[in-house]
Image (tube, helix red, strand yellow):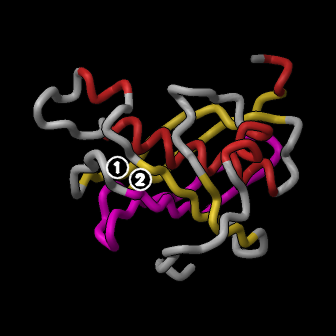
Amino acid sequence: MAETHREQVPVMNTKDIERILPHRYPFLFVDRVLQIDLEKSEIVGVKNVTSNEPFFQGHFPGAPIMPGVLLLEALAQTGGILVHQKGYDKKIAVLLNIANAKFRRPVVPGDVVLLYVVGLHISGTGGKIRGKAMVQEQLAVEAELSFALVDKGQL
């Protein structure tokens, strides 16, 4: 998937995403979806990082950095949207495992994070995705995430 998405019209906005994911502020970390390719099992999401994010009050005052685990969560949520779009709309992806996570660059207020996710394996019981978060064409975070699919009524 091409990694240049500036000024692209979103495929999904926040309201569309809220119809898919159970997350809400302050724990919804995908603002828009720019691209979905169901044949290739790929999706590109966006997280706009602002200075008024609640986690910046304590991480770290005077030198705010977005917590790495929240970037992993943003990748997981983007993967959840992909899973939904692939036909598992009656289920929710629940994180099971994080592998090969590497943090390469801090994410700070003002950054626009592009969330690239590829479905490595997706079935009715769960799967695995590979994701990377990019800021200004620089790799910030990469990881593989495994998940189980549970019925929405079970949560």
The number of numbered badges drawn on the structure is 2
Q: Earlier in the sequence, mark 2 or mark 1?
A: 1
Residue placed most toward the observer, 36 or 127: 36
Image quarter for residue 119? bottom right
Image quarter for residue 15? top right
Residue placed at 23% from the left, 57% from the top?
104
Question: Which SS does the magenta portion mostly show?
Answer: strand
Q: Residues within 10 Å of mark 2 (few under 14, many from 20)?
A: some
Three-letter amino acid code of the residue under disc 2:
Ala
Residue placed at 70% from the left, 49% from the top?
81
Residue range highlighted in magenta? 112-141
User: Which numbered disc covers residue 112?
Assistant: none
Percent position (x, y) of residue 9?
Answer: 66, 70
Q: Is residue 30 visible?
A: yes
Residue placed at 37% from the left, 25% from the top?
54
Residue placed most toward the observer, 143 or 81: 81
Percent position (x, y) of residue 58?
Answer: 23, 21
* Tag 1 secondary structure: strand
- Residue beneath disc 2: 143
Residue lying farthest left? 62
Asked if marks 2 and 1 touch (Cβ < 8 Å), the reply is yes
User: Which numbered disc covers residue 101?
Assistant: 1
Percent position (x, y) of residue 116?
Answer: 52, 63
Residue 12, above or below 89: below
